[in-house]
Amino acid sequence: MAFNPDFSGYQVMLPFIEEAKASQIPSKDVLQSIKENSAMSGVFRFMKEEYGVSIDVFLKVIYDAFSHRWKDKTPANKYVSSLKQTYDWCCRNWDLVATSVDSLKSTDLEAIVKEQCLQYLPNNVVFPDLTVYFVFNGCDGRGFKSEIYMDITLCAILGKEKCVSLLAHEYHHSCRANFALRCSNPKWKNAFETLSCLESEGVADKIYNLGGVLPDNDYPPLRQLIKKRKEIYENAPKHLAEVEKGILTDVAPRKTFSEGSNHPLGNYMADLIERRFGRTLLVDCVGDPLKFLKTYNEAAKQEKRDEAGIFVFSKVVIYKLGQIMEDL
Ligand SMILES: [Zn+2]
């Protein structure tokens, strides 16, 4: 099976949650088995690396939420504060979370995810092996080369249908990575990565756009994210002019796309390509960020004849794309 769901990270946390609910001191055996679980070890690794949050702090957040201890304390760290919000929701909606996990367990995820991915992939695509770990991961879905870590609270907030589509979005990244154009020339690194960020997220967002569709259940941080990304999408021409500047001056993509703005901007570009030229041509751009921008520009030029306020990238950018292409 190419697409492997793994629920062990959820399962291993259940005794710990029961202890927290009963306000018992967590037993050594339970803590040991959590630390030894390979899915949760993955979570602990990137949480430490990216946010400086240790296993103990992370487990304390979950313990405190389920034992109703933390409400009067204000956390110092912004990330810890968002974790607390997630697991407070998780505790208040625990039945929903558990039902949502059961429902995912009894679904043929691989079949649905592949079918949704294929809408935006070439027919001859080779499906790579990928393990999806359903874990406690702070309201986040995170994709690596051959692993996805999916927070079970996020699954419950989204609802099953949207959760499966988000998995398809993530799996699309893995499939694309197998044949995508690469750039090894450091001279073009920033510009190429900027273009890749637009193309990869823009097309994957056609399958599921976390920042574009309201989830089944209300969760304020997600509502805010959707509002923010909607504003960016609606003002895409203004933001794309900034992206152009970034490409021409070699700005790192993380500076050009603060707070994931590449999602709505890439999605805006993909929408325009599909609307003007159809899905087949959009699929032809998957894995080729240079072609994605050029095709968007052709679509934008056509659209501009009908509508004002469409952003067309300048000839200087198109010339730069040519240079990058010759010298990847
Ligand atoms: Zn993505």
Image: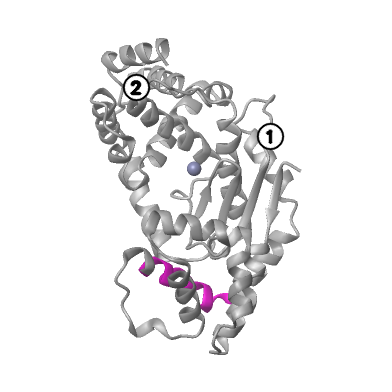
What kind of residue is marked 1? Answer: Phe
- Residue 328 falls inside the magenta stretch: no
Identify the residue shown where x is 47% and y is 79%: 65
**Helix, strand or loop at mark 1:** loop
Identify the residue shown where x is 63% and y is 25%: 122
Mark 1 or mark 2: name the one nearer the start of the chain: 1
Identify the residue shown where x is 38% and y is 68%: 80
Q: How many C-alpha atoms fall within 10 Å of the one at disc 2: few (<14), some, or many (≥20)?
A: many
Question: In this rendering, is residue 35 above or below 308?
Answer: below
**Front-most of residues 106 and 250:** 250
Q: Which quadrant, please, contains the C terminus?
A: top left
Question: In this rendering, is residue 297 above or below 50?
Answer: above
Q: Position of residue 121 (x, y in %)?
A: 61, 29
Residue 77: quarter of image: bottom left
Q: In the figure, is residue 228 to the left or right of 114? A: left
Q: Position of residue 275 (x, y in %)?
A: 49, 27
Question: In this rendering, is residue 297 above or below 151?
Answer: above
Q: Where does label 1 land, which residue?
A: 127
Identify the residue shown where x is 29% and y is 39%: 235
Residue 293: quarter of image: top left
Q: Is residue 159 visible?
A: no
Q: How many C-alpha atoms fall within 10 Å of the one at disc 1: few (<14), some, or many (≥20)?
A: some
Q: Is residue 277 visible?
A: yes
**Helix, strand or loop at mark 2:** helix
**Front-most of residues 77 and 140:** 77
For the image shown, how many numbered marks are present on the structure?
A: 2
> Which color scheme is applied?
one colour
Q: Where does label 2 land, which residue?
A: 188
- Residue 92 falls inside the magenta stretch: yes
Q: Which span is picked out in magenta?
A: 81-94
Q: Main secondary structure of the magenta part?
A: helix
What kind of residue is marked 2? Answer: Trp
